């Protein structure tokens, strides 16, 4: 009976930890996605200085948020986000509207895909 109780408690803790991590990933991804949308809006209006400021905010948020992601996520996914962020910064610096918007769209997709990919769902388990 003791063994059963210990196993049950461990399973509950693992599931609770998984749900908390998923919620934290989703919250962080939504915040980063909002930053990406701000940058996109500034680029669409050709406000390059504001876009540059917003991309710096996005980068700071990524550094703060992305610090704990390697513990629970695939490092390749994180590297892809960092590479995309570096590209978009250069596109903004060169005031390339089309490339900037395309790269921001890709960056947003990668950010929003992570919580979905890591979610505790039947689709991901099977």
Image (cartoon, grey):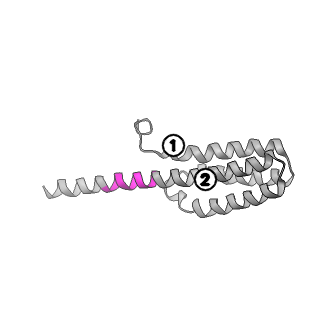
Q: Residue at x 49, y 55 (%)?
A: 24
The residue where tag 2 is placed is 78
Q: Residues within 10 Å of mark 1 (few under 14, many from 20)?
A: few
Which region of the structure is painted magenta?
Answer: 13-22
Image quarter hosting the C terminus = top left
Q: Residue at x 48, y 46 (%)?
A: 118
Q: Can residue 92 be seen in this snapshot?
A: yes
Q: Earlier along the polypeptide chain: callout 2 or callout 1? A: 2
Question: Foreground residue, 24 or 39?
Answer: 39
73 left or right, relative to 62? left
Q: Residue furthest left?
A: 1
Q: Residue at x 71, y 53 (%)?
A: 85
| 21 is within the stretch colored magenta | yes
Q: Is residue 95 above or below residue 65?
A: above
Q: Which mark is residue 69?
A: none
Quarter of the view holding residue 10:
bottom left
Q: Which mark is residue 117?
A: 1
Q: Is residue 37 above or below residue 65?
A: above
User: How many numbered dots are placed on residues in this image?
Assistant: 2
Residue 100 horizontal/vertical position (percent):
78, 46
Quarter of the view holding residue 16:
bottom left
Residue 3 horizontal/vertical position (percent):
17, 56
For marks 2 and 1, give the CA distance: 13 Å
Residue 84 horizontal/vertical position (percent):
71, 49
Image quarter hosting the N terminus = bottom left
Please identify the dominant SS of the magenta region: helix
């Amino acid at each position: 009976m003791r063994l059963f109780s210990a196993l049950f408690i461990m399973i509950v803790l693992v599931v609770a930890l998984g749900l908390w991590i998923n919620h934290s990933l989703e919250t962080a991804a939504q915040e980063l996605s909002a930053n990406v949308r701000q940058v996109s809006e500034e680029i669409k209006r050709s406000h390059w200085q504001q876009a540059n400021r917003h991309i710096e905010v996005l980068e700071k948020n990524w550094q703060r948020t992305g610090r704990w992601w390697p513990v629970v996520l695939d490092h390749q996914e994180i590297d892809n986000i960092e590479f995309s962020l570096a590209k978009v910064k250069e596109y903004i610096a060169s005031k390339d509207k089309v490339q900037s918007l395309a790269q921001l769209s890709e960056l947003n997709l990668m950010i929003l895909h992570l919580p979905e990919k890591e979610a505790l769902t039947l689709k991901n388990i099977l």
